[in-house]
Image (cartoon, rainbow, N blue to C red):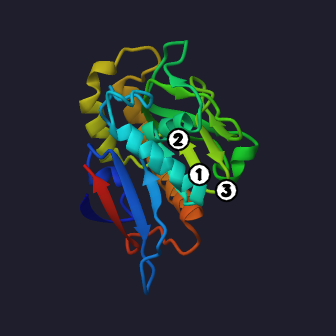
């Protein structure tokens, strides 16, 4: 485990494009709280599937950790592959949609009625995926998009899963455009020009919503400005 120091004011993608997972421990004025929170779990190697636990043994380790977090009520937020891993761990089907469409760009995320507590209104968020998940039994459906009806869910009081990448900055998405340039032209994927146009208009609202989401999940003591430090352990 390699310790990485970051601030909540900078989206976690800035810690590096090859992070398998980020575990953040909230810092109070006097001590480290003894509980840990999975701020995001995402993987930018396009070929990783949440169900390929034999090919990628680390997925089994993370599934056991997800189970432990859920059982103990530790705040848990999965993004992209992380959301798929939570769904898979809870027994839901994960895989490519029958439509064959993919999402790579900035797509409108719409809340369900139950989802308005965490997503008050529709907004465009970054996406980069070609798999989806079914709703786990007992989960609450939170959001959808035109191409992927199942975009987010909650499970219990402290587990949240979003297919999107709201942690991505403009600079971070530029790197994704370079790394995933082979997917331009595929069904559902926005052109670079469309991505840029939507990105510049959506980035501020996406960041504001994401910081608010972290504050809601972590707790009211979390400050969402650059002075609020998190110490993260990134398994790379």
**SS category of the residue bearing label 2:** helix
| Camera sees residue 137 | yes
Residue 84 image offset from top left, x and y in percent? 50, 35
Residue at the spot x=40%, y=62% of the render? Answer: 24
Residue that badge 2 annotates: 86
Disc 3 or 2, which lies upstream in sequence? 2
Question: How many numbered discs, if any?
Answer: 3
Q: Is residue 158 left or right of residue 171?
A: right
Name which quarter of the figure residue 174 lies in. Answer: top left
Q: CA distance from mark 3 to mark 1?
A: 6 Å
- The numbered dot on residue 140 is none
Residue 100 image offset from top left, x and y in percent? 49, 13
Q: Residue furthest right?
A: 113
Name which quarter of the figure residue 10 lies in. Answer: bottom left
Q: CA distance from mark 1 to mark 2?
A: 9 Å
Disc 1 or 2, which lies upstream in sequence? 2
Q: Quadrant of the N terminus?
A: bottom left
Instruction: Please rate how many residues cluster around mark 3, counting C-alpha atoms within 10 Å: few if below 14, some from 14 to 19, many from 20.
Output: few
Q: CA distance from mark 3 to mark 2?
A: 14 Å
Q: Nearer the viewer, residue 203 or 163?
A: 163
């Amino acid at each position: 485990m390699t310790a990485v120091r970051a601030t909540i004011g900078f989206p976690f993608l800035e810690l590096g494009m090859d992070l398998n997972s980020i575990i953040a421990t909230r810092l109070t004025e006097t001590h480290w709280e003894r509980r840990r929170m999975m701020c995001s779990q995402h993987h930018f190697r396009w070929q990783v599937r949440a169900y390929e636990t034999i090919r990628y043994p680390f997925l089994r380790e993370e599934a056991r950790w997800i189970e432990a977090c859920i059982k103990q009520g530790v705040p848990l937020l999965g993004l992209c592959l992380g959301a798929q891993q939570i769904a898979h761990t809870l027994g839901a089907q994960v895989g490519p949609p029958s439509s064959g469409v993919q999402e790579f760009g900035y797509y409108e995320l719409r809340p369900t009625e139950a989802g308005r507590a965490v997503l008050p209104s529709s907004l465009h968020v970054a996406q980069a995926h070609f798999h989806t998940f079914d709703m786990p039994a007992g989960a609450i459906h939170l959001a959808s998009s035109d191409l992927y009806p199942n975009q987010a869910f909650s499970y219990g009081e402290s587990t949240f899963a979003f297919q999107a990448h709201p942690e991505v900055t403009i600079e971070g998405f530029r790197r994704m455009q370079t790394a995933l340039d082979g997917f331009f032209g595929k069904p559902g994927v926005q052109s670079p020009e469309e991505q840029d146009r939507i990105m510049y208009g959506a980035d501020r609202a996406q960041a504001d919503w994401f910081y608010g989401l972290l504050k809601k999940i972590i707790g009211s003591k979390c400050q969402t400005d650059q002075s609020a430090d998190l110490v993260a352990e990134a398994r790379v």
